[in-house]
Amino acid sequence: MSLLDTLGSLFGSSSQQPGGNQAQLIAMATEFVNNQPGGLNGLIQKFQQGGLGDVVQSWVGTGDNQAISPDQLHNVLGSDVVTGLAQKAGIQPDQVSGLLAQVLPHVVNAATPNGEVPADGQINTSNVLGTLGNLASLFGGNKSS
């Protein structure tokens, strides 16, 4: 339930249409991973080069996901990438870092249910949205102020 509460408060505070923007962020995160050279494998390599290989491996593995701070994520991805994602989402760069720090571990985890990266490194967006998209419908249909 804490994931639902966290995502609900984050998305609720950053948008006027929480359900739609949650699904959009999940889709954007999967698209971002898939557009990396090498897909998920390329993202894992970026994290390893940034000194956070153990963090991303926890997302891929079957154990608990290690948390990542917005600053750590920003450092791994780089300012240009974060700014580009923020423009695409229509939010501020610091907001996108915060949201992705919450969502990306779950996207990677959902894409690797058996602790294995897909051979081609591509995340199946439909599967991830099917797993995590339920969060968006819960927030969109059950908004309380």
Image (tube, grey):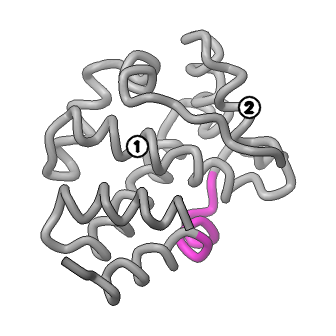
Residue type at mark 1 is Leu
When the figure is inspected, residue 117 is found, relative to residue 67, above or below; the finding is below
**Residue at horizontal 19 percent and vertical 56 percent from the top:** 14
139 or 96, which is in the foreground? 139
88 or 59, which is in the foreground? 59
Q: Position of residue 3 (x, y in %)?
A: 52, 60
Number of numbered discs visible in the structure rendering? 2
- The first of marks 2 and 1 along the sequence is 2
Q: Is residue 85 magenta?
A: no
Q: Position of residue 126 (x, y in %)?
A: 57, 72
Residue denoted by label 1: 100
**Residue at horizontal 55 percent and vertical 11 percent from the top:** 50
Q: Is residue 129 magenta?
A: yes
Residue type at mark 2 is Gln
When the figure is inspected, residue 28 is found, relative to residue 47, above or below; the finding is below
Q: Quadrant of residue 48?
A: top right
Q: Position of residue 63 (x, y in %)?
A: 81, 45
Marks 2 and 1 in Cβ contact (< 8 Å): no
| Magenta region, residue range | 123-131
Element type at mark 1: helix
When the figure is inspected, residue 118 is found, relative to residue 9, above or below; the finding is above
* Magenta stretch: helix, strand or loop mostly: helix
Q: Is residue 89 left or right of residue 101?
A: left
Mark 2 and mark 1: span between their CA atoms?
17 Å
Residue denoted by label 2: 57
**Residue at horizontal 73 percent and vertical 36 percent from the top:** 58
Q: Is residue 132 left or right of residue 61?
A: left
